[in-house]
Image (cartoon, rainbow, N blue to C red):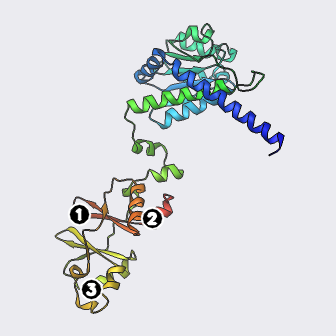
Amino acid sequence: MTSSTTDLLATARRVIATEAEALTALGASLDGSFTRAVGLILATKGRVIVSGMGKSGHIARKIAATFASTGTPAHFVHPAEASHGDLGMVTEADVALVLSNSGETPELADLLAHTRRFSIPLIGVASRPDSTLMRNADVAILLPPAPEACQTGIVPTTSTTMTLALGDALAIALMEHRKFTPEHFRVFHPGGKLGAKLLKVRDLMHTDLPLIGADAPMSEVLLTITRYGFGVVGVTERGSLRGIVTDGDLRRHMEGLLSHTAREVMTRDPRTIGPEALAEAALAIMNDRKITCLFVKEGDTPCGILHIHDLLRAGVV
């Protein structure tokens, strides 16, 4: 390892250690202002308007996105654009969450004045308790003193990391209070890998089912397996799923196969899944049992069938 590589790694570790220490200090410093901020957000009938300028603005955008995707309606408003008409987005039903490390960012002035004029609840986040933002905030969350990670102390690094973590803490506290579930999360994340993992079995299953009566001859079973192409048929009695016949069952009964009935060849009490289960759970069963299909039941009644190819197409695998 060259000396330059060693220096680079030392810098990286110093930066991470500095920010980690600041996050520990932030956690220890949280007090009643945090719980009051959560209470204000829970009480609002509108949205959380998150705003900040520069690096704080980028953090504000992320916090607004996290709020919105976890059950707290939120919107980012750029403070400079707010001064040119976007203040109309901020209504008396909303609550404002304004971020500024110094608490004196001039571009925030019109937004702060707007919240005071219309009695819009204001949550301020800054590192200076006597700053304009903190003095005007209904709830002021103070960032603890911590050095920026750069040696010059001028690049927003530690301060933005703390602000981002604080936003996550608010979002998760709100999420847990509202008992926000994976199903709620999926509604806001229908696309991508995350959305795929949160799909339900009902979203992917086939409802045209390969079913046959328990007393059906194996010639009919073979025709049904061939027609549907799943490599399996469900065997029913009085509408309830009692077993399945798979390609493996056919091979095990090759001698005199056509002299049997479905009941005599079937695998009894097959593993099934409910329609409201996550597709991810169905995949786990298939992997564990080394199977490629699952029947879906409501009670004892078959209502669908899920093939591993359905999971592949949806991006669950």
Circle 3 residue: 218
- Looking at the picture, tell me which residue is in the foreground, 312 or 268: 268
Q: Residue sitting at 54 percent across and 25 percent down?
A: 49
Helix, strand or loop at label 3? It is helix
Mark with earlier residue (2, 1): 1
Q: Residue furthest left?
A: 238
The amino acid sitting under disc 2 is Asp
**How crowded is the residue under tag 2: few (<14 C-alpha within 10 Å), some, or many (20+)?**
some
Please state if 205 lies on the left or on the right of 303 as rendered: right
**How crowded is the residue under tag 3: few (<14 C-alpha within 10 Å), some, or many (20+)?**
many
Between the C-alphas of marks 3 and 2, the distance is: 28 Å
Residue 86 appears at what percent x and percent y?
Answer: 61, 24
**Residue 222 seen in the current view:** no
The quarter holding residue 308 reads bottom left
Q: Residue furthest bottom?
A: 256
Q: Residue sitting at 58 percent across and 20 percent down?
A: 98
> In the image, which disc is placed on residue 234?
none
Task: Mark 3 and mark 2 in contact? Answer it, CB < 8 Å.
Answer: no
Circle 1 residue: 301
Q: Residue sitting at 27 percent across and 61 percent down?
A: 297
Residue 309 appears at what percent x and percent y?
Answer: 46, 67
Residue 83 appears at what percent x and percent y?
Answer: 65, 19
Please state if 32 lies on the left or on the right of 261 as rendered: right
Circle 2 residue: 310
Q: Look at the picture and state if 250 lies above or below 25.
A: below
Between the C-alphas of marks 1 and 3, the distance is: 22 Å
Residue 237 appears at what percent x and percent y?
Answer: 18, 72
Count of picture labels: 3
